[in-house]
Image (spheres, rainbow, N blue to C red):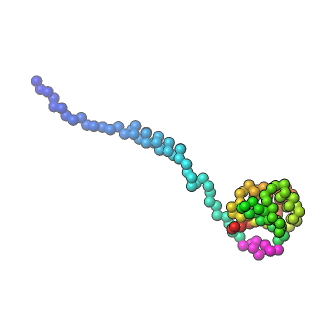
């Protein structure tokens, strides 16, 4: 009686399930990771030299500082919409151009609120200038 020789069978590794698991892990890590650097946009605002020569002659200038102070003429006010509207009407002339000079770190909410107050009170010609600090 002849017994067959035991040969080593070829070992096969199925990689199809392995690829599926790797793709599921990649999708999981992409979906749950936080992308901290790209959540905010770093925008370089344009600079202009046009207003520098006319800045001394303008009476209708509003300076908005990052600490919440608003300078209209020679008076300083804190950001408060009710008092600010009265200060705008008392210190600015509707017919002239209004220069809104804003520091770079001022929140957009304050800028939009001031622009809204100006437009609500018939100040139509508004120019915006960015201050370095």
Residue plotted at (87% across, 65% down): 91
State the count of labels: 0
Q: Nearer the viewer, residue 67 or 11?
A: 67
Is 13 placed left or right of 108 in the picture?
A: left
Position in image of residue 4 (x %, y %):
16, 29
Q: Quadrant of the N terminus?
A: top left
Is 58 placed left or right of 36 in the picture?
A: right
Position in image of residue 94 (x %, y %):
88, 63
Position in image of residue 24 (x %, y %):
47, 40
Q: Quadrant of the C terminus?
A: bottom right
Residue 55 seen in the figure: yes
Q: What secondary structure predominates along the stretch shown in magenta?
A: helix
Q: Is residue 43 above or below residue 8?
A: below
Residue 100 seen in the figure: no
Q: Residue furthest top?
A: 1
Q: Is residue 74 above or below residue 26?
A: below
Q: Quadrant of residue 76?
A: bottom right
Q: Is residue 77 magenta?
A: no
Residue plotted at (82% across, 71% down): 58
Is 21 placed left or right of 86 in the picture?
A: left
Q: Nearer the viewer, residue 125 or 80?
A: 80
Q: Quadrant of residue 105?
A: bottom right
Q: Nearer the viewer, residue 72 or 59?
A: 72
Give, as a single range, the part of the protein colored magenta.
49-57
Q: Is residue 114 above or below residue 3?
A: below
Q: Quadrant of residue 71?
A: bottom right
Residue plotted at (77% across, 75% down): 53
Position in image of residue 56 (x %, y %):
80, 74
Residue plotted at (30% across, 37% down): 12
Q: Is residue 52 magenta?
A: yes
Q: Nearer the viewer, residue 75 or 48?
A: 75
């Amino acid at each position: 009686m002849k017994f067959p020789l035991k040969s080593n069978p070829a070992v096969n590794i199925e990689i199809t399930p392995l690829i599926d698991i790797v793709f599921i892990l990649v999708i999981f890590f992409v979906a749950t990771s936080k992308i901290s650097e790209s959540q905010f946009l770093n925008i370089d605002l344009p600079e202009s030299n046009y207003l520098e020569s006319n800045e001394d002659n303008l009476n209708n200038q509003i300076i908005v500082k990052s600490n919440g102070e608003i300078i209209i003429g020679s008076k300083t006010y804190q950001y408060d919409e009710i008092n600010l509207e009265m200060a705008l009407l008392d210190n600015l002339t509707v017919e002239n151009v209004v220069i809104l000079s804003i520091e770079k770190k001022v929140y957009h909410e304050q800028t939009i609120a001031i622009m809204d107050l100006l437009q609500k009170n018939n100040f139509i010609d508004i120019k915006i200038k960015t201050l370095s600090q």
